[in-house]
Amino acid sequence: MRLTNYFPGGTYVTDPGRRRTLLDRWLGGARWVFYADYIRLVLSCSRAARRGRFADEAWNRSSWEVLDSMERHGARFDIEGLENVAALRAPVVFVSNHMSTTESMVLPALIRPHRPVTFVVKESLTRGSLFGPIMRSRDPVVVTRKDARRDMVTVLEEGAKRLAGGVSLVIFPEGTRQDEFRPANFNSLGVKLAARTGVRVVPIALRTDFWGNGKRFEFMKEWGPLHRDRKLRFAFGPAVDPAIGAREAHRRTVDFISGKMREWARMDGRPAWEPQ
């Protein structure tokens, strides 16, 4: 089934003339204006999922709607390397750094029009009454984040099943959101899965700290501040064949993400990025 491709071409940049909503401007950019719109969308998706009506096109559209809502509330996106996704003719393992809720919401609209895809997610996300029905409808690979060895076995076994069924997999090797990319925390599980199953790895570099993480309580992580001065950046790299060796494939993946972090720091006037 061909899905709507909201991002044709290799790149996407938010229209610089796009204005924030009137309500957002009236209320001085209060984050809850955006979050009210976001909650409305999530509730709609959750209802559809409970009724068995949240298929791939609905997921694809809702992902685009999140991006669109973010733009209407001050976000500016710069996405590159989409030609590397469009060129795929077989399932792959997407390996990405992880900064915020944004990537979980936006990546489906960037990937799914080209390839069936699902995510490795923590178990708690599949249980709640709000996000749970949505997550379960995507047939994700579910990990506990409590037992690293058990989680590794789950990803290798269940991930292999998804890939054999033609479904690509998105893995965040850092495990949880990080305020900066730290190569030392970026494990090689995605590359190991790719090598074991004979598929390629596509690295994704991203900087999504426009959508800040709440700090006070675990359940508030989704509702952090919005940093409108920070551009959201995504870059999809060329596919890496693990036949070159898992160690080398992992190095190339990390080097791609590290290179983008340095490049974006220069472009955005941020402090120079160096690996930690």
Image (cartoon, rainbow, N blue to C red):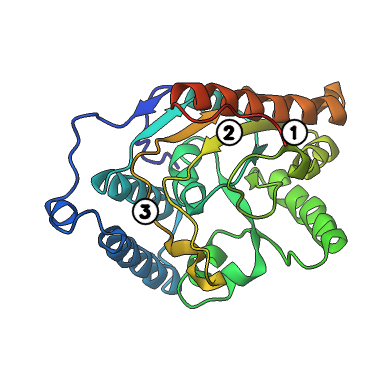
Q: Residues within 10 Å of mark 3 (few under 14, many from 20)?
A: many
Q: Mark 1 — residue? A: 199
Which numbered marker is on residue 62? 3
Q: Mark 2 — residue? A: 205
Give the spatial CA distance, label 3 vs label 2.
22 Å
Mark 3 is on which residue type?
Ser
Q: Residues within 10 Å of mark 2 (few under 14, many from 20)?
A: many
Q: Are marks 3 and 2 in contact (CB under 8 Å)?
A: no
The residue closer to the viewer here, 261 or 93, is 261
Residue 273 picture location, percent across and down: 61, 29
Among the 4 quarters of the image, the one containing residue 27: bottom left
Mark 1 is on which residue type?
Val
Which numbered marker is on residue 159? none
Q: Earlier in the sequence, mark 1 or mark 2?
A: 1
Secondary-structure class at tag 3: helix
The residue closer to the viewer here, 97 or 238, is 97
Q: From what the image shows, is residue 213 above or below residue 180?
A: below
